[in-house]
Image (cartoon, rainbow, N blue to C red):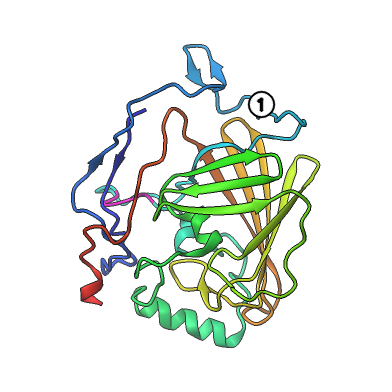
Amino acid sequence: MMRTRMSASILATAAVVALLSVTSAPVAAQWAPRPAAGVAKKPGNLPDAQASAPKTADGKPDLSGVWEAEKNRPCPPEGCTDLHTGEQFFDIGWGLKGGLPYQPWAAELVKTRTAQNGTEDPGTHCLPTGIVRSHTFPLLKKIVQLPGLVIILSERNTAFRQIFTDGRPLPVDVDLPSFNGFSSGKWQGDTLVVETTGFNDDLWLDQHGSPLTSEGKITERFRRPSYGQLEIEITVDDKKAYTAPWTVKLNQHIVPDTELLDYVCLENEKDLKNF
């Protein structure tokens, strides 16, 4: 399918504060439509999202494909003016009874960051945003599943992430913490369980500024219940920022017959000078 890219100035609040800005006009996709191999079909030669998930040679679900975050936040009556974002992009704890269990200092910090309309958001300044926000950002991601390794390619800033599934343990001492941390995964039945540590201090988990500190550990559980659906259950355990571990589930949907495009935050960027 032919896709288009709208400008990347995502509205942080009703005050119309831009998170990112790439270009002011739609950009046509450069890839011509090309039927992808192995797409499950139903009568009429249409993709069958409810078909069984494909398997790898060792019998595990194949997570490979181009995916997009669930669009569970309705557009206003006049339509979305920019990229269509989901609820968890703004509030990763959306849907949790009582919200996230912030430590008192973290709750105050989120109030301050929300009032500032995201002006201090690392993503606003075109920095990497970490693995949780990569799952909620409204651009495409491509998963490549190989023996011993799962690679996630993201359109945003043409970024990559490595999840090692070759049995290696997580590093005990991290000399160089990073935005994505260090990820090691193993299969438990049809679920890929990924543990990640070694983060930079004070990452943002959503647009409101929910923090993740360097003491945090993230556990993801990837499931592909059908050809067209990917479920990612995320548990955050960060005693410095939260009074208890908490878990959310994100839904992703397959986008067949297309490929990723370059998306560079700083290209034609016009918003930072206003912050």
Residue 113 picture quarter:
bottom left
The percent coordinates of residue 238 (x first, y second) are 67, 75
Q: Is residue 218 or residue 267 the one in the foreground?
A: 267
Instruction: Tell which residue pokes out farthest to the right in this image.
Output: 189
The percent coordinates of residue 163 (x first, y second) are 64, 52
Instruction: Tell which residue pokes out farthest to the front in this image.
Output: 175
- Neighbor class of circle 1 (other Cα within 10 Å; few <14, some 14-19, many 20+) is some
Residue beneath the point at 32% across and 26% down: 32
Q: Main SS type for the magenta part?
A: loop
The quadrant in which the C terminus is found is: bottom left
* Residue 17 painted magenta: no
Residue 136's place in the image compared with 191, above or below, is below
- The span picked out in magenta is 80-84
Instruction: Tell which residue pokes out farthest to the top in this image.
Output: 43
The secondary structure type at the circle numbered 1 is: loop
- Relative placement, left or right, of 118 versus 252 is left
The percent coordinates of residue 192 (x first, y second) are 72, 47
- Relative placement, left or right, of 34 versus 99 is left
Give the residue type at disc 1: Ser
Q: Is residue 8 visible?
A: yes
Residue 242 picture quarter:
bottom right
* Residue 82 painted magenta: yes
The percent coordinates of residue 77 (x first, y second) are 28, 48
Residue beneath the point at 34% across and 66% down: 12
Residue 252's place in the image compared with 96, above or below, is above
Which residue is tagged 1? Answer: 52
Residue beneath the point at 39% across and 56% down: 157
Residue 58's place in the image compared with 120, above or below, is above
Q: Is residue 94 visible?
A: no
